[in-house]
């Protein structure tokens, strides 16, 4: 499965908001050099899916709701992802397709906070190894 640009940008957007806290789409687009109109479209879809919450007015912006997973963002931005069942007549191919789908879903069913913790461990271990 190849992640679409929309899904990739959505993951970057959610991660950026989790890292910085409430922020505007314009700020995120500028800091990450992403197209603002496309990011606004993505943020609307994530808001409808319940992943983002918008606050209007001074100090407003977007917040992340709960602890979304990569799979949550993927399905919100590419709904046909879950519906991409392959119609196969051969039982072996059907079993193989089911296993691949399960593995991909498992890989994407990771919370952003878990990814951040894993990245911190890798960075810390890399620094520790370089110092020693």
Image (cartoon, rainbow, N blue to C red):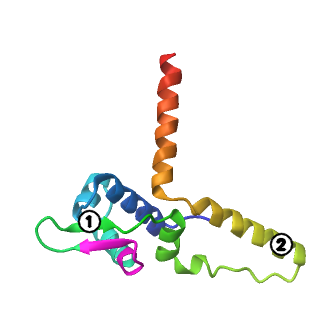
Q: What's the CA distance linking mark 1 and mark 2?
A: 42 Å
Q: Position of residue 64 (x, y in %)?
A: 35, 66
Determine the image quadrant of residue 93: bottom right
Residue at screen point 46% across, 40% down: 120
Residue 35: x and y in percent read 31, 64
* Mark 2 residue crowding within 10 angstroms, few (<14) / some (14–19) / many (20+): few
Q: Residue furthest top?
A: 132
Q: Say which element carries label 1.
A: helix
Q: Which mark is residue 95?
A: 2
The circle on residue 25 is 1
Image check: 98 left or right of 120?
A: right
Q: Quadrant of the N terminus?
A: bottom right
Disc marking residue 123: none
- Horizontally, is 111 left or right of 24 in the view? right
**Magenta part of the chain:** 46-54
Query: Which image quarter: residue 89?
Result: bottom right
* Residue 100 colored in magenta in the image: no
Say which residue appears at 40% left-offset and 67% top-offset. Answer: 66
Q: How many numbered marks, from 0 up?
A: 2
Q: Is residue 130 above or below residue 110?
A: above
Q: Is residue 29 above or below residue 44?
A: above
Where residue 63 appears, as percent x and y from the top left, is 30, 66
x, y (%) of residue 15? 39, 57
């Amino acid at each position: 499965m190849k992640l679409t640009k929309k899904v990739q940008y959505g993951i970057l957007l959610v991660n950026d908001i989790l890292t910085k806290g409430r922020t505007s789409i314009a700020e995120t687009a500028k800091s990450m050099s992403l197209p603002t109109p496309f990011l606004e479209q993505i943020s609307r879809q994530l808001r409808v899916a319940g992943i983002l919450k918008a606050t209007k007015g001074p100090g407003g912006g977007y917040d992340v709701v709960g602890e979304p997973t990569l799979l949550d963002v993927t399905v919100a931005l590419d709904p046909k992802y879950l519906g991409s069942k392959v119609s196969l007549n051969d039982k072996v191919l059907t079993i193989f397709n089911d296993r691949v789908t399960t593995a991909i879903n498992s890989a994407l069913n990771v919370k952003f906070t878990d990814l951040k913790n894993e990245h911190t461990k890798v960075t810390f271990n890399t620094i520790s190894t370089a110092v020693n």
